Amino acid sequence: METAYKDLEVCILGILQRAITETRTMVLMGQTEKAADLLDALDNIPRHLANWQESSKFEIQAQLSYFMEKYPNHLTNYVEVFETKRSLIW
């Protein structure tokens, strides 16, 4: 279980890193509403990482899904990354 959580933790940290970069770009391009929506999808993640519960995974996935439903053509598919536990850390 520890390894599975560690893989998920690395994935989530990569998502946060990518989202910070993308948010900066969105703000510079004047896409402030989209940037705010992305940050809304991510703002509870640190709380989940600090106090992981069984429901945390589902709550994070729901927030990411809401963003991706609103912006289906967004460059990074955060739901896919989260579900596959793919690392985005460069």
Image (cartoon, rainbow, N blue to C red):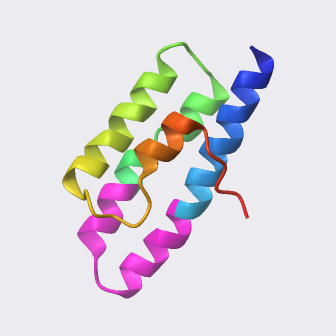
46 within the magenta span: no
> Would you say 56 lies left or right of 74 here?
right
Q: Residue at x 20, y 53 (%)?
A: 70
In the displayed structure, 33 sits above or below 88; it is below
> Would you say 54 lies left or right of 90 here?
left
Q: Which residue is drawn at 56% across and 33% down?
A: 47
35 within the magenta span: yes
Q: Quadrant of residue 80?
A: top left
Q: Residue 57, image x and y in percent?
A: 50, 25
Which residue is outermost to the right? Answer: 3
Which residue is outermost to the left? Answer: 70
- Which stretch appears magenta? 19-38
Which quarter shows the N terminus? top right
Q: Residue at x 79, y 23 (%)?
A: 3
Q: Residue 72, image x and y in percent?
A: 25, 56
Q: Which residue is drawn at 56% across and 52% down?
A: 15
Which quarter shows the C terminus? bottom right
> Would you say 36 lies left or right of 58 here?
left
Q: How many labels does the image show?
A: 0
Q: Residue 75, image x and y in percent?
A: 40, 67
Report the magenta stretch's main SS.
Answer: helix
In the displayed structure, 31 sits above or below 68; it is below
In the displayed structure, 4 sits above or below 75; it is above
Q: In which quarter of the image is residue 30?
A: bottom left
Q: Residue 24, image x and y in percent?
A: 48, 76
Q: Nearer the viewer, residue 43 or 38?
A: 38
Q: Nearer the viewer, residue 74 or 42?
A: 74
